[in-house]
Image (tube, rainbow, N blue to C red):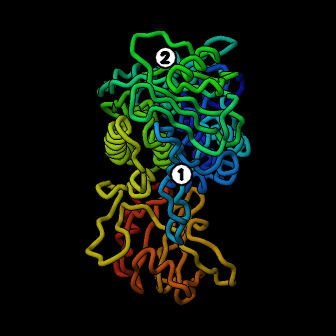
Amino acid sequence: MPGTPEPEVIISGAGAAGLTLAIDLARRNVGFLLIDKAGEPFIGSRGKGIQPRSQEVFEDLGVINRIVASGGEYPVMRFYTDEGPVDRSFERSGPTPAEPYHIPLLVPQFLTERCLRERLAELGHAPLYGHELTGIDQDDDGVSARIATPSGERTVRAAYLVGADGGSSFVRKSLNIGFPGKTLGVRAAVADVRADGVPTDAWHRWGEGTDAQVSLCPLYGTDMFQYVGPVPFDVDIDVSAAGLTALFHERTGRTDIVVREVSWASVFSMNARLADTYRVGRVLLTGDAAHVHPPTGGQGLNTGVQDAYNLGWKLAAVLDGAPRSLLDSYERERRPIAEAVLGLSERLLETARSRFTSRGREVSQLDLGYADSPLTIATPHRDKGPLAGERAPDAPVTGAGGLDTRLFSLFQGPHWTLLGYETDRTAAPAVRKGLHIHTTGPRGDLNDTEGHFRDAYGLAAGQWVLIRPDGYIAAIADTADLPTIEAHLDTVSSW
């Protein structure tokens, strides 16, 4: 890499969180270096659930269509009981104008990460594999990272470094950040396998609620199944095709199903842990480096993606001249989310040990928000509609030229958005870099003849909504209060 300009940000770890952060920085023209100590991309299915809120994030990053095409909806669960097989479907509800994604997707992690790498390549970047972070030194002006590469060690200087390097994070350990929590008393084998004798029309589950349970879940977009089963502690587990077949036969009595190939396998103990802090100076943690969850509820990968989505715009703003204190809001907003998700994952694990539990909206992550954030202007009492700090709803609208569009299409990109409902466009703040303004009403560029915008936000004529770059409501205000919004923008940007 001789002659390469020094980056503004170093990202250690090219999993889903690191790739998400890289895409967000790339579209903001922030120079970065994305490294991973592994010699090649991860090949396992591990984090296979993509929740509705993450789908909204992926739409904004320009990758949702290829991710949807890479996987599919979760299949019916087929429980094999003494009385015969019983099929149970996941609770599903259709999309609404305000919430266009309601159904979680089943996409093997390696395919999700492949889609993210493709999007990153479109933006002119790629991860560097076989590059291991071996040391970190920082001062008031930046971070010096020692990196072992295939051609030798080099030192790279950057303004910030982000550890997206997983549960055993070198970055976290180098900073001596505590990682308290607990091992949850469950050890499991998980593997991506090709198997004969099992159809792909269902997620097959045997011995549910017992220590002898085992399951085979079809991995859409591939010809494989994800094989999962609890295993004893302190026992060597044979994860070869023959070993997994023998374990399966022992637990199910089904000798007609045979594992013939293992693409990837892991034996792990489930943990729930949360870092003592997400930031030390110019070094930050994101994803599994900051929190690890049991896999129940499909929360881990999604929480990491949304960590990175929260951090990206703030790093870019600070590098562009916004106050460094803006970065304080990253942990203030994301750590309570991780705490809540850890509690949810543990509760789901406990119920899953004894019985099948249908998982509904609580795992969608659509209702998570930042009401207590310093970046949120408290909303006066409202009879309806979302409050500041909550996720910004979508809604179909019509452009002044008569073409249909959506609010999410207007939000897409690295900017802030100010929406006015039945307002005078001339009352809006002056046009400035990084702020897009859209209004209905006199001289407005939008029409809301069906009332979807009005209803989704619970607005009265003359009200404005300020939307953050990551799709959360920063403020809801009347026209008379626009100076408050302008002053707020000055605290979170370089304008």
Q: Which residue lies most toward the front here?
A: 83
Q: Secondary structure at mark 1?
A: loop
Rendered residue at 29%/65% (across/down): 378
Q: Dot 1: within a 10 Å radius of its alpha carbon, few (fewer than 14), some, or many (20 or more) residues?
A: many
- Quarter of the rendering containing residue 238: top right
Q: Secondary structure at mark 2?
A: strand
207 lies above or below 135: below
Q: Amino acid at mark 2?
A: Gly
Give the x, y percent position of residue 416: 51, 62
Rendered residue at 51%/41% (across/down): 84
- Whichever of labels 2 and 1 marks the residue nearer the N terminus, that label is 1
Q: Amino acid at mark 1?
A: Pro
Label number found at residue 104: 1
251 lies above or below 378: above
Which residue is disc 2 drawn over?
A: 135
| 436, 487: nearer the viewer | 436
3D distance between C-alphas at marks 2 and 1: 39 Å
User: Which quadrant holds the N terminus?
Assistant: top right
